[in-house]
Amino acid sequence: MKIKITETVLRDANQSLVATRMPFSDFEGVLEALDKAGYHSLECWGGATFDSCLRYLNEDPWERLRKIKNKVKKTPLQMLLRGQNLLGYRHYPDDVVRKFVACSVDNGMDIFRIFDALNDFRNIRVAVDEVLKRKAHAQGCICYTISPIHNIEMYVKMGKELESMGVNSICIKDMAGIMGPQEAYDLVKALKETVKLPVFLHTHSTTGLGPITYIKAVEAGCDGIDCAISSFGGGTSQPPTETLNYALKQIGYETGLDEKVLKEINDYFRPIKQKAISTGLMDSFVMGTETDALVYQIPGGMLSNLIAQLKAQNAIDRLEEVLEETPRVRKDLGYPPLVTPMSQMVGVQAVSNVLSGERYKNVSKEVKAYLKGEYGRPPGEINPDLMKKVLGDEKPITTRFADTLEPVFEKTKEQLKGIARSDEDVLSYIAFPQIAEKFFKEREEREALKVTYSIVKI
Ligand code: CO
């Protein structure tokens, strides 16, 4: 049997280890090798890459995608899409979601892994529909979390719902790396017995469970796993590609991967990792094993964020209290999975509850919007006292929030006449207005400079 391996070095490994700061020029030279290795797919876009390209790297994310496609001709390209949130942190109207998917396909995207932080699938329906319409591959996600209300039955129900939506495959997304081998075995088995679709598992090495969890998942019938080439694997990134390739082959599975090419890829990335370490971009924290996440059940990325927040407020001595408060906040909010944007919301609220000396004395506008139902249906019941305190007599909405949003694409395109050069530019602007505007301006300046330079040269 063949196990499909997705390489994440350009997206999730990049995001988990170096805060998505790897510029295109760093990996341009290895794209052909990545294409030759025999991967099922190459995850290279989405998540934070779009934001980071515009904000920090002065790169047009769309151009990056086209340049990757130009060199990676046979391996399907894969992206992570936050459902109705696209690559941002709020819900966009349906016309923007459809246009974004259409442009992504036009620019070379093949596989769309789509999730909603609350597993409220009303928020991924439009994206899935558009992906299928464009003849691309729609992979629906189940965000995995552990709580008193989450169980296999609930996840299997989600799997059925995704299947009836028409997705091509299902991904179990364990963003925190807290899924143990037995849980993986039971969950994959139950899903495979219920749905006819291929099942993929995504985890992180954060707690050290990753590789063991993958092996048990495969034994239960899992069709594909996510790995990162070893110099960018392990720690808060994915389990290492070569290690899993070696282990899987030893127990009798095929992977289709070419070891020689894998070595070539790893040799290429090793000095890039060294550079990231020496400039401080890659911290020792993300490279090690963080078993605290098993105790607190919170993702490694969120843990480092909490530490950073407390340090910034000179309150690192309150960490223990914040770690005790975090699960209480999560319970009050109906046990949302701790993935973007819920991980940020819960973390900020827990810090505020501890430092202000009174629980929910300050409530962020995001948490308020969440209580109003604007992010979707919470998995469990929200604490009624909290609801009363924040919303008073106001009733939360029960419909899909995007149904209340007016179309904005054409209007924005009109407004950006002379500034945006393409529909892709308009989408960048809708996603991150200030940053995109700054990027467009700097692009003009750079190009003007180039023209002057070439005239002088003549
Ligand atoms: Co991930």
Image (cartoon, grey):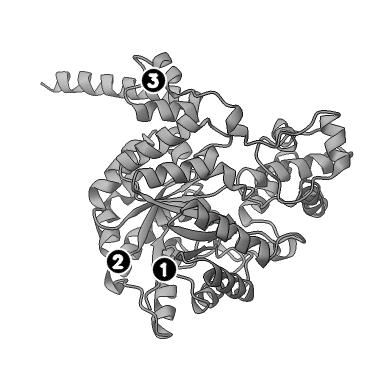
Quadrant (top left, top right, bottom left, bottom right) of the C terminus: top left
Relative to 9, is 243 above or below?
Answer: below
Foreground: 256 or 231? 256
Residues at marks 3 and 2 touching, judged by CB atoms closer than 8 Å: no
Foreground: 301 or 341? 341
| Left or right placement of residue 156 versus residue 362 in this view | left
Quadrant (top left, top right, bottom left, bottom right) of the N terminus: bottom left
Q: Residue furthest left?
A: 458
Q: Under tag 2, what secondary structure?
A: loop
Q: Image quadrant of residue 64?
A: top left
Residue named by callout 2: 38
Q: Residue furthest bottom?
A: 251
Q: Amino acid at mark 1?
A: Thr
Q: Amino acid at mark 2?
A: Gly
Numbered circles on residues, count = 3
Disc 3/disc 2 C-alpha distance (Å): 40 Å
Q: Image quadrant of residue 345?
A: top right
Q: Amino acid at mark 3?
A: Lys
User: Residue 441 shows which numbered tag?
Assistant: 3
Q: Under tag 3, what secondary structure?
A: helix
Give the x, y percent position of residue 131.
40, 45
Q: Is residue 314 visible?
A: no
First in residue order: circle 1 vs circle 2: 2
Foreground: 99 or 89? 99
Give the x, y percent position of residue 9.
41, 57
Foreground: 113 or 239? 113
Q: Nearer the viewer, mark 1 or mark 2?
A: 2
Residue drawn 35% across the image and 78% down it: 254
Question: Mark 2 packing: few (<14 Cα in 10 Å), some, or many (20+)?
Answer: many
Residue named by callout 1: 241
